[in-house]
Amino acid sequence: MVKALKRLYAGLVYTFLYLPILLLILYSFNDSKYSGKWNGFTLKWYKALLEDSSIMSALYNTFSIAILASIIATIIGTVSAIAIFKMGPRMKTIFMNVTYLPVMNPDIVIGISLLALFTAVKMKLGFITLLLAHVTFNIPYVILAVLPKLTQLNPYLEEAALDLGATPFQAFYKVILPEIMPGIVTGALLSFTLSIDDFMVSFFTTGSGVNTLSIKIYSMTKVGISPKINALSTVLFLGIVILFILLNKREKISE
Amino acid sequence: MKKISLLLVCVILVMSVVGCSKGEVNEQGYYNEINVYNWGDYVDMQVIEDFEKEYGIKVNYETYGDNEEMLAKVQSGGSDYDVVFPSDYMIEAMTKEGLLQELDHKNLPNFKNIDEDLKDMSYDPGNKYSVPYFFGTIGILYNTEMVKENVDSWDILWDEKYAKNIIMINSPRDSIGISLKRLGYSMNTKNIDELEKAKEELIKQKPLVKAYAIDDYKNMMLAGEGALALVWSGEATMLAEENDYLEYAIPKEGTNLWFDCIAIPTTSKHKKEAELFINYMMRPEVAAKCAEYIGYATANKEGKKLLPEDMQNNKVRYPEGDILKQGEVFTDLGEFTVEYDRIWTEIKVQ
């Protein structure tokens, strides 16, 4: 009885998680422009998606920003985390709080304040401002992902490396870095997904015809969201699934 | 190896960003890029690509979801859009704030292709700041299997017969507007007594209403979960064309006429190229292409003639005569907008 209930509960949870995605995939093959009505199977939305230059450029922008922003934020965040880790207790508290603030801040506040900053320094809105904004909101997440790994380190590890003749840089690069790598990877992945997902901050800080996918999709509400978007989401979802399978395979091999 | 390839990706990406054209004059004597800011999915991208090829001007194309968003971006001053697509009341508001540039009609010879009935409207007398792109009405989308009578009056949305089968628009201006029209008042009234009467009618109607929706009405109507819906014509006429059991009607008491137009914000530094683009958008074949792709009613009379017969002859999509004359365009109410919002809130909390 209890077992059956457990199963039912788990089943419900996963249904809620995956049913919407399944519906989305289903409607990407629907011949009608409107969901809610099945008109027969078609692949025309996939064709239309490939031909739609504005969606394609939004896709390209989204990924360029996400890749660049996560790499830059990871480098800055990791270095900052190490600096914070080496501070005295009082400074550490101050900096930790300063790091937490942007995480708690609503997106709209970040977006508007960055817009105010960019206009104040007369920067033309576009790819660069968008990138700076994304790097900005990603940094705290990287710091928060890397810090716990640093606190887990054996405090004498670095000294030992130095004693054994490593230069400070070598000690960091060959000893510390591999140890905190899992935290860095977590931070980078988190940045990447946050960046792809973001609408609010991007909306306020982009310009000069640089659209991202979330802005593009949101702006379609006037004429109805085209099934092209369903097709795109299906492709992205499959991409993520394949990525997961590959990652799992790799882990199995390395084990 | 992985690190090196990652680095390479980075370098390529950075190069692609920095390597962007820095904007110079091309061989045809035009500045080589313009920034266009439009509603999402509101143009056939093919016409944008053709424009780029023909004039050697790169179009940076960006999209928004509603007028207020566009206004926020234009007001912020950090943007430099050359062409925007505001609606009627927004043109009025932007003109008041000095956010739009006057158009030089010498550079817009294709303006002659625009339907005379749709020129010189109250929101922009003499089309000094804008040219119409698409236009439409508010009307009733109804299910012919559930509604057997003739739909020709707003009264049907107050008919007990259709209790819990009526879908209203979740938009204060439009819902209060038709309540005002039904009582014979103006949709732009600033008379509190008239507004209070319209409010009472909407409160009376509330028990009959299934939902106040904007986008979700489509699925409800398609699934037969509603008999009547108050809707904007743009998508409703397309739904009626696609489905035999749905029809769109414009009531005789008059309706709202809405316009989505093309204009040049004061932030634009390339008026010549922006006017070139607007003139191009008014070519009959370009207007027709866009109208066919989006399915809305084009304001371009010559373009309309190039559309498929059934699209052209659709009387609800292209209303004529009295409906156009009776149709009221929303005016910018300025500070008075808060009164409409207040009344809407009072209706919603009943």
Image (cartoon, helix red, strand yellow):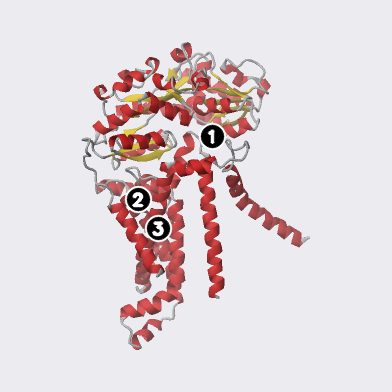
To the question of a shared chain for discs 3 and 1, the answer is: no
Tell me whether circle 2 and circle 1 mark residues in contact (CB < 8 Å).
no
Q: What residue type is labelled 3?
A: Ile
Q: Which amino acid does label 2 sit on?
A: Leu
Instruction: Kindly identify which chain the residue marked by label 1 belongs to.
Output: B
Q: Nearer the viewer, residue B72 or B51?
A: B51
Label 3 neighbour load within 10 Å: few <14, some 14-19, many 20+ = many
Residue B98 in view here: no
Q: Is the C terminus of chain B in the top left, top right, bottom left or bottom right quadrant?
A: top right
Where, by quadrant of the figure, is residue B48 drawn? Answer: top left
Instruction: Kindly identify which chain the residue marked by label 2 belongs to.
Output: A
Residue B156 placement, left or right of B336: right
Labelled disc at residue B215: 1
Q: What residue type is labelled 1?
A: Asp
Residue B346 placement, left or right of A212: right
Q: Which of B169 and B152 is in front in this view?
A: B152
Label 1 neighbour load within 10 Å: few <14, some 14-19, many 20+ = some
Q: Distance between the residues labelled 3 and 2?
A: 13 Å
The residue singled out by tag 3 in the image is A67
Which element is circle 3 on? helix
Residue occupying the point 29% across, 43% down: B78
Q: Where is residue B17 in the image (x, y as percent from the top left)?
A: 31, 52
Q: How far apart are marks 2 and 1 (CA)?
A: 30 Å
Q: Which of A197 and A67 is in front in this view?
A: A67
The residue singled out by tag 2 in the image is A130
Q: Is the N terminus of chain B in the top left, top right, bottom left or bottom right quadrant?
A: bottom left
Q: Distance between the residues labelled 3 and 1?
A: 34 Å
Where, by quadrant of the figure, is residue A55 drawn? Answer: top left
Q: Where is residue A17 in the image (x, y as percent from the top left)?
A: 60, 52
